[in-house]
Image: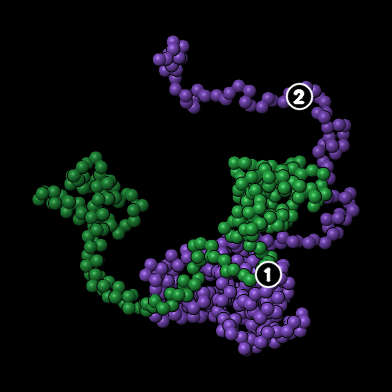
Chain colours: A purple, B green
Amino acid sequence: MASKVTEQALNLIKAMPRVALNNIKPLPYTAFKKKVNRQGNRKKKGRGDKGQGARGTWDPLGYEGGQHPLIDTSPRERYYAQYAVRRQYPPVSLLELQRLIDLNRVDVSRPIDITSICNTGLYSFHISKNHFGVNLTDEGCDQFAAKINLEVQWTSELVIAAIEKNGGTITTRYYDPPCLAALYDPLTFFKKGQPIPKCKVPPQDTLAYYSDPNFRGYLADPEKVLEAREKLAQKYGYKLPDLKDDPVKEMLLMRKDPLQIFYGLEPGWVVNLTEKCILKPKDEDYLRYYHTAY
Amino acid sequence: MATLSATLLRTCSQCRSLLPKPFNSATPVFHAFYKSKKCFLRNNHTLSKISLCRLLCAKQQLISRHQSTSSSEGQDVDDLLKDFEISHEEFRFVEQVLPSPTVPDLIEPSEFPTPSGWFPPNESLQAQQKYFVRRTKNHMLPVYCQMKNTWYGTTHYVSIKKIEGDIWALEADLREHVLKTTGQKKVNTQVHEVGRFIRVRGQHRDLIAKFLLERGM
């Protein structure tokens, strides 16, 4: 039961007009108070007497009274020049890779590439942020003790030495962004039902890196790579393990085709996950597109 | 019905002449609608009536087109199916690439620590303690660094999570250990009994991890 007061109030509200644009106004004291010029119009308004201060004609920032300013004389060091356009390679250290191998997150009996590192769920990158894959850094190069066939996107000389010392092999490989999307999350890619993309040729500024035998580029001459392996062993003073008598020689020398992105799967094939089969198109024009590089 | 069909037909015959012209040219349409006003079923919605006529015409065209091309379409479908080769053998390469839904089991290594410096939990040492810190699903210690940037400066914390048993005993041991090793005069700690975690102020991550490993956690 409502009291008399509330009934009266309700009746009052019923009698009043509806709230509309024509009858609303701001609450009292919500707006700023207008500043009153107590000095009147004749005084100097807190700016002092005469000069640049009173007239607001100060020198521009960095101006040194006609002297050649510091900003012009000192050389520019543009660390972040073209930052939005540059290719980024989020790092993974050798120590982290060794930890993944120790805890059975990465299978050593098969070649390791960017997919096997991403499938652990402990490494991630964003294609939208111009990330182009893994940069393997040299932290923990002394502790590294695994014999692997590795494929990364960027490395240094010391890392290559650390891996080849233990009898492993390493290649640097470029992937274009659509291929990286498929490699980063293969399950969602296969669910789309799209054909496996072919990998493009690396852009011109990285072509030198990926065809360099010293960085084990995937476009380098394999004979020159063998020479570079021996040279690096001499430089760092370790004995290069012989690959000929190796029981896992086949695994260590497994390489992808420059157009291929998954081991054993050719570009242009379509994967059917529900029926667990692969569809291989036979059309000549289709095959010509997926088997030519440009 | 006969009269209705007659009226429809008449309107249609008038609209058909308008069909090839685009929709935007409004004037000829209106022209037509004034001329054929008598034959509309509802005089109120004349414009919609015209569009109905247009639709009918378009539908008839579609049907006629479909009938003429239906024989050739069947052949196309057959060609598409013949164009593919289906293989089940190479699906194993797909299975190699797919991620495992769970964290794989550990292969028990013979030597500890492993090359990366990892120790397994020691059960005999754990039994001596009043408390227990459970490992994460990735077989690591739940010790985390935190940093807080505020206007008065930067503060560093180390938080220890997944604590079971007597949390106050662990706090006392930690406090004593940090004071002894670092030589500080005091340590600030926070104990959360409900959330089962402890926060220690300072950059003592490695120190605390080593302390927990010594207790077999």
Write down the residue under mark 2. A37
Q: Amino acid at mark 1?
A: Pro
Corner quadrant of residue B116? bottom right
Q: Nearer the viewer, residue A161 or A108?
A: A108
Q: Position of residue B76 (x, y in %)?
A: 30, 74
Q: In the structure shown, which secondary structural element does the residue marked by tag 2 occupy?
A: loop
For this orientation, the residue located farthest to the left is: B2
Quarter of the picture holding the C terminus of chain A: bottom right
Q: Secondary structure at mark 1?
A: loop
As drawn, B45 above or below A136 = above
The amino acid sitting under disc 2 is Asn
Q: Is residue B128 visible?
A: yes
As measured in the structure, the alpha-carbon distance from the residue carrying label 2 to the one carrying label 1 is 76 Å
Q: Which residue is mark 1?
A: B115
Q: Which residue is at 53% across, 65% downward?
A: B104
| Residue A267 image offset from top left, x and y in percent | 48, 76
